[in-house]
Image (cartoon, helix red, strand yellow):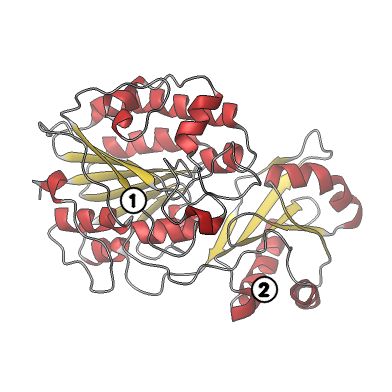
Amino acid sequence: MPFKRIFLIVMDSVGIGAQHDAKAFGDEGTNTFLHTAQACGSLNIPTLNQLGLADLANIPGTSKREHPQSFVTTLIEKSAGKDTMTGHWEIMGLEIKEPFQTFTKTGFPQALIDELSQKSGHRFVGNIAASGTQIIEELGEHHLKTGEIILYTSADSVLQLAANESIVSVQELYRVCEIAREICMCPEYLLGRIIARPFVGDSKKTFKRTPNRHDYALSPGVDTTLDVLKNNGFETSCVGKISDIFNQQGVSRSQKTISNSDGMVKTSQEIDRSFTGLCFVNLVEFDSEYGHRRNPKGYGKAIETFDQELSLLLPKLTAEDLLIITADHGNDPTHTGTDHTREKVPGIFYSPSFKLGRQLKERLTFADLGATILANFKLDIPSHHIGKPIVEVLD
């Protein structure tokens, strides 16, 4: 094997330019990384600059340079959607030909709400697309007075239920989510995830979400790169919401995170462990805290913080390690609306063993990442996977 361990970090939503089909998604001209940097004046990201980011876009704060220890490229999403599950499932080999249902613009049909109310015994308030912290601030006091569970969605294929732990117990909220998951398995409501969002506090000034979040996701249904690795005895260690995205399928070890920085700390701790296989990491705050909220300054600061933390992580990697940095879609914080954006994503490959790092030609699917991982471990790529190994990284 070229590498004993592979660390795959997804900078959630950090796209790097509109795809050829972006117009069909209403996303023509978007570029999350570039426009964030422009809105901030420039970005102080010396580590990413050292790795060759400037080869991929003319990002203020970066400059072209030699980067013999890293290969860089961009990858195009082949699947039909631009949501979190679609992006991650494609990274792990699958093409999603039919996009997951979303109800961002309309809210959920009243028939769905009525059925959930009848089967759960609860009433609901909200039914809009919103930021989780924002809607809790807006409707949390109403929830405390009435007991109505806050129901909302986002740009993803998701139904979220938020309740104060003093009003609706965590276990009861989980029960309601399980009922919603069953209802939302039918074709007209088919959603990627149902999410329980417990919170605490007695006023809008003190409301705070707790670590008791729980996701009820669809399973891929067929083997992904994670399954192939796990079935062949390799570790699949997942950090952040990865295990939720795959509904625990193919996951041998999982750790939740509370922030990007917490995710980087846990990734660093994984580097300190001895294992053979994949560590798959999602850093969600780029997307959830800054992209959907159209906050380019906050987005830029998050990228700069990631760069600082990355500088501490790189020296811990050995010649037996490969680090891959990528994204799952875009979420241009300077674009209209609050939805994800249809963008290609960066692919940065770093190892101390590399001597001839350079820019590679653009890849035609995110799935080339999963195929490269399987090829590294000398495993056959399933026939239903769409990716091809990036051979330059493994030579």
Q: Is residue 118 visible?
A: yes
Q: Image point 40% across, 48% down: which residue?
A: 344
Q: CA distance from mark 1 to mark 2?
A: 30 Å
Q: How many marks?
A: 2
Q: Could you tell me the amino acid type at mark 2? A: Ile
Q: Tag 2 or tag 1, which sits nearer the N-term?
A: 2
Secondary structure of the residue carrying numbered label 1? strand
Q: Which residue is mark 2?
A: 179
Q: Image point 55% across, 50% down: which residue?
A: 340
User: Does residue 139 appear to the left or right of 349 in the view shown?
Assistant: right
Dot 1 surroundings within 10 Å: few (below 14), some, or many (20 or more)? many
Q: Which mark is residue 260?
A: none
Name the residue nearer the viewer: 287 or 226: 287
User: Does residue 271 appear to the left or right of 77 in the view shown?
Assistant: left
Q: Image point 84% across, 38% down: which residue?
A: 203
**Residue 364, x across and y down, in percent:** 30, 56
Secondary structure of the residue carrying numbered label 2? helix
Dot 2 surroundings within 10 Å: few (below 14), some, or many (20 or more)? some
**Residue 26, x across and y down, in percent:** 57, 53
Q: Could you tell me the amino acid type at mark 1? A: Ser
The image quadrant of residue 114 is bottom right
**Residue 360, x across and y down, in percent:** 21, 42
Q: Is residue 301 visible?
A: no
Q: Which residue is mark 1?
A: 237
The image quadrant of residue 227 is bottom left
